[in-house]
Image (tube, rainbow, N blue to C red):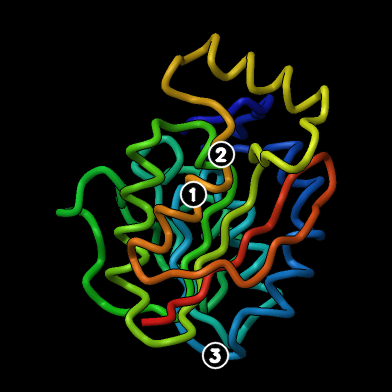
Amino acid sequence: MQTMDTITTLPDGAAASPAVARNTGPILEVLRAHLPAQGRVLEVAAGSGEHAVAFARALPGLTWTPSDPSPEARTSIAAWAGAAALPNLSVPLALDVLDPATWPTEAVQAVVCINMVHISPWSATMGLMRLAGQTLIQPGGLLVLYGPFLEAEVPLAPSNAAFDDSLKARNPDWGLRDLNEVLVAARSEGLRLTLRRDMPANNLMLLFRRVS
């Protein structure tokens, strides 16, 4: 489970993240306004699973399927899901965006990915776009990204500059991604940016829709 956050692990294996506690409400506000009332949502790199539980509880018309390549993360997701016992929250998938053999084959109405793009190599972002292109087969299918990004026309906040430096010091393949490069990767899979929303702590919500 890749994270830059301070994690507390509970006796049942559930991980608790302070960042999740802070950002769940603002993210949910955007999801509630733009996700369909019914359908299937695939969450990529679901981490601790706290988001999955919160969103599945708040959006009961959606079937929420969390995923993460980390066994530690899937243990945490299963622990939170078991305690919540929500009928619309599926068991976590061992999905790795770098391994197409792990990708689900069924179509979904939305793919949600929170705080992965900057804590992974660029190849993971490319894999995420290919996954979205494969699973969002209906026009209007939604890809949601959340996290910090670099924008040529927007001055970089000092806190994000320091964060970018810390990411690259931990792993030179990590770091904030140029939004224009992300848009090009999305367009290559038939996805077009339809919403850019400023979020707390210098993060962005990016919504892409399938157009072809």
> Is residue 95 something one can see in this rendering?
yes
SS at mark 2 in the image: strand
Q: Is residue 19 above or below residue 204?
A: above
Image quadrant where one finds the C terminus:
bottom left
In three-dimensional space, the C-alpha distance between marks 3 and 2, rounded to whole angstroms, equals 33 Å
Q: Which residue is mark 1?
A: 182
SS at mark 3 in the image: loop
The amino acid marked with disc number 1 is Val
Residue 95: image tag = none
Q: Which residue is mark 2?
A: 178
Instruction: Classify residue 177 by image quadrant.
Output: top right
Q: Earlier in the sequence, mark 3 or mark 1?
A: 3
Toward the top, the furthest residue is 169
Residue 93 image position (x, y, % from top left): 33, 57
Toward the front, the furthest residue is 153
Q: Earlier in the sequence, mark 3 or mark 2?
A: 3
Q: Residue at x 31, y 52 (%)?
A: 95
Could you say which is closer to the camera, residue 11 or residue 112?
112
Q: Residue at x 51, y 42 (%)?
A: 116
Q: Residue at x 25, y 66 (%)?
A: 104
Residue 110 image position (x, y, % from top left): 48, 74
In three-dimensional space, the C-alpha distance between marks 3 and 1, rounded to whole angstroms, equals 28 Å
The amino acid marked with disc number 2 is Asp
Could you say which is closer to the camera, residue 127 or residue 56?
127
Q: Which residue is mark 3?
A: 38
In three-dimensional space, the C-alpha distance between marks 2 and 1, rounded to whole angstroms, equals 7 Å
Q: Residue at x 42, y 87 (%)?
A: 139
Residues at marks 2 and 1 touching, judged by CB atoms closer than 8 Å = yes
Q: Is residue 178 above or below residue 27?
A: above
The amino acid marked with disc number 3 is Gln
Q: Is residue 25 above or below residue 156?
A: below
Mark 3 vs mark 1, foreground winner is: 1
